[in-house]
Image (tube, helix red, strand yellow):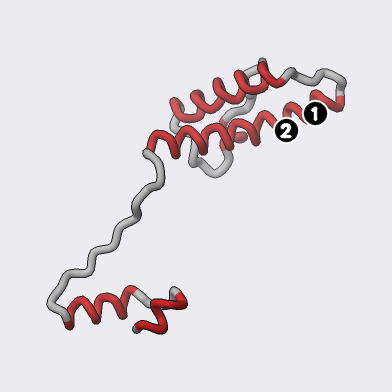
Amino acid sequence: MERAELTGGITIAKLAEVATTLNCSLVYILVPNETIQETVEAEARRAAASILGYAGRTMALEAQEVDQRRQREAVRRLAHDLIDRGALWQRSPLAQHASAPTP
């Protein structure tokens, strides 16, 4: 078990076996590094930036670039919209958001 532990190869089954041997219950948890709200907001910003990045590149090709302040505001608005609509973890937020808010 010690070798498997060192290489990160120990299995849940092996841990359960050890727990039973020691008359213990096996409990494992995931401990978030930030609050759920922070995780949701960060993911929403990533999704919004991805969605708007496509629109921004298209606009840049047309010489209609949006300044950074307006881009940040558009990302913030779209991120909140994705959260409010519950569309954040859908397969394609872009498909659910046919038109991103214009800056």
Amino acid of disc 2: Tyr
Residue 90 location (% of width, % of height): 50, 41
The number of numbered badges drawn on the structure is 2
Figure quadrant of the N terminus: bottom left
Examine the image and state in which quarter residue 29 appears: bottom left
SS type, badge 2: helix
Residue at 58% across, 28% down:
97
- Judged left or right of residue 46, residue 12 is left
In the image shown, does 44 or 22 lie closer to the viewer? Answer: 22
Residue at 17% across, 83% down:
21
Examine the image and state in which quarter residue 84 appears: top left
Residues packed near mark 1 inside 10 Å, few (<14), some (14 to 19) or many (20 plus): few
- Judged left or right of residue 28, residue 32 is right
Examine the image and state in which quarter residue 50 appears: top right
Figure quadrant of the C terminus: top right
Is mark 2 in CB contact (under 8 Å) with mark 1? yes
Residues packed near mark 2 inside 10 Å, few (<14), some (14 to 19) or many (20 plus): few
Amino acid of disc 1: Thr
In the image shown, does 47 or 42 lie closer to the viewer? Answer: 42
Q: CA distance from mark 2 to mark 1?
A: 6 Å
Q: Which residue is mark 2?
A: 54
Residue 88 location (% of width, % of height): 49, 36
Q: Which residue is mark 1?
A: 58
In the image shown, does 13 or 86 lie closer to the viewer? Answer: 13
Residue at 44% across, 32% down:
86
Q: Which mark is residue 67?
A: none
- Judged left or right of residue 69, residue 47 is left
Residue at 24% across, 81% down:
17
Residue 101 location (% of width, % of height): 62, 19
SS type, badge 1: helix
